[in-house]
Image (cartoon, grey):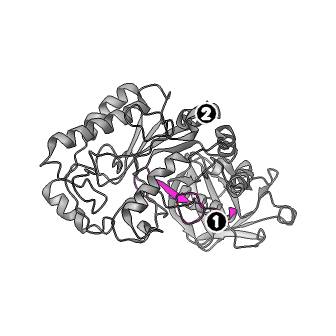
Amino acid sequence: MGIKESWTLCSEDVSWTVRDRPDYQDYKQAYENLQTTFNPVEFDPARWARAASDAGMKYMVFTTKHHDGFCMYDSKLTDYKITGSKTPFHTDPGADVTRELFDAFRAEGMWVGAYFSKPDWHSDDFWWPYFATPDRNANYDPEKHPERWEKFVRFTHGQMMELLGGNYGKVDILWLDGMWVQKMTPEEERLNRMDTYNFGTLARNQDIRMDEFVAGAREKQPGLIVVDRGVHGKNQNYLTPENVVPEKALPYPWESCIITAGRSWAWKPGAEYMSTREAIHMLVDVVTKGGNLLLNIAPGPRGQWQEGAYRLLEEIGGWMEVNAEAIYGTRALAPHKEGKVCISRKGEDTLYLYYLADEKEDLPAEIGMTSFSLPPGTKLELLGGQGKTLSWRKNGNGFLATIPGSIQKNPPCSHAWVIKAVIPKP
């Protein structure tokens, strides 16, 4: 179908809530009736996991429940789920797709993460039918109706613990969305209403008691990374800039979550994926600023990935086969980037210099920087360049490395090339 995920149910007047039907109640009923036709019979978690692993990915984050409240796992606390009797796929042996995915990705040696939405627009204890639903928040004041809010808190804790309690094995990351559902003081409510992200919505104290939940969750899942995104404090273990790469290195752990196709998190028919060159350059930009890159791939209504997704991951994997050592375990290093050259470090004596090529640009004869110098005796080699040592010379306050013609004619990869620099020990 290719409609916007969840947000079309929200009454805020912004670009991502636009609906294709003029009547809201008619649209909401049609949206919720999608459950009765959802039958992802082409779901192939093993193929997804192999493709991700071959691309060099080390972890995945799967959307177990978005804001619309539909569960992609076998929650015992709602019938609005993929394993529910109204969903045709519920009779499939692999109907609990979260379990199938987690098992498949673990089999490839990858970490697994569970995306979970704190707001639930299908729950009568969040969007109470007694009131209208003007925005993304609970449509009643939890402080005026504490009994109803307590029911929602217990429901949410229960659903999250279903994922973390052991039935789904080892879970490495709990990735929580819906930052507006948080504990707020009156002053924080006022400031939140002024926040450009919340567009002046009716921000209110929606204390879901995350400290309490996380303590219990870590008893079940020791070492669990919790990402209560957008909520400052101890439960936001890393930050998640969305669809953007920060302009400079950040002084804390972070991950850019990026759409790969169709300018939408949701599946769209015939979507065009980002180019391999764009993806590799973005990966280098993120890594050399000290972050991780989380790429979104949206499956279609039959559970299938588009071939463009597989092709993109395969081509990223080809580049990673040559350059993986310059991606894993590196750290940001000033000045980060000069022109088309990025820089990072690993340990005390290894640097990596990444040349980001223009479209259809060949490997140049020289690569260098003017704002960063190399110590005398530094040895350079191009990754994938048959171990040949590159000559280099000082260039003012910087350096220039020479790429032999034999390597230029037969470069080890495309789109970006990496020079490894080993600094002599004192």
Please indicate whether residue 400 sits to the left or right of residue 130 in the image: right
Could you tell me which residue is drawn at 45 percent across and 68 percent down?
Answer: 21
Region in magenta: 250-276
Q: Which image quarter: residue 76?
A: top left
Label 1 CA crowd tier, 10 Å (few <14, some 14–19, many 20+)? some
- Residue 233 shows in the view: yes
Could you tell me which residue is drawn at 65 percent across and 68 percent down?
Answer: 399
Q: Tell me residue 195's x, y (percent).
A: 28, 66
Please name whichever residue, 379 or 104, is drawn nearer the observer in this view of the structure.
104
What residue type is disc 2 on? Asp
Does 99 appear in magenta? no
Residue 363 got which mark?
A: none
Location of the N terminus (image quadrant): bottom right
Q: Tell me residue 160's x, y (percent).
A: 38, 36
What residue type is disc 1 on? Glu
User: Mark 1 and 2 residues: CB-CB less than 8 Å, in contact?
Assistant: no
Label 2 CA crowd tier, 10 Å (few <14, some 14–19, many 20+)? few
Q: What secondary structure is marked by label 1?
A: helix
Measured in 3D between alpha carbons, the distance from the residue under mark 1 to the one under mark 2, in whole angstroms, is: 38 Å
Mark 1, residue position: 278
Residue 92 got which mark?
A: 2
Could you tell me which residue is drawn at 58 percent across and 53 percent down?
Answer: 298
Please indicate whether residue 373 sits to the left or right of residue 181 in the image: right
- Residue 223 shows in the view: no
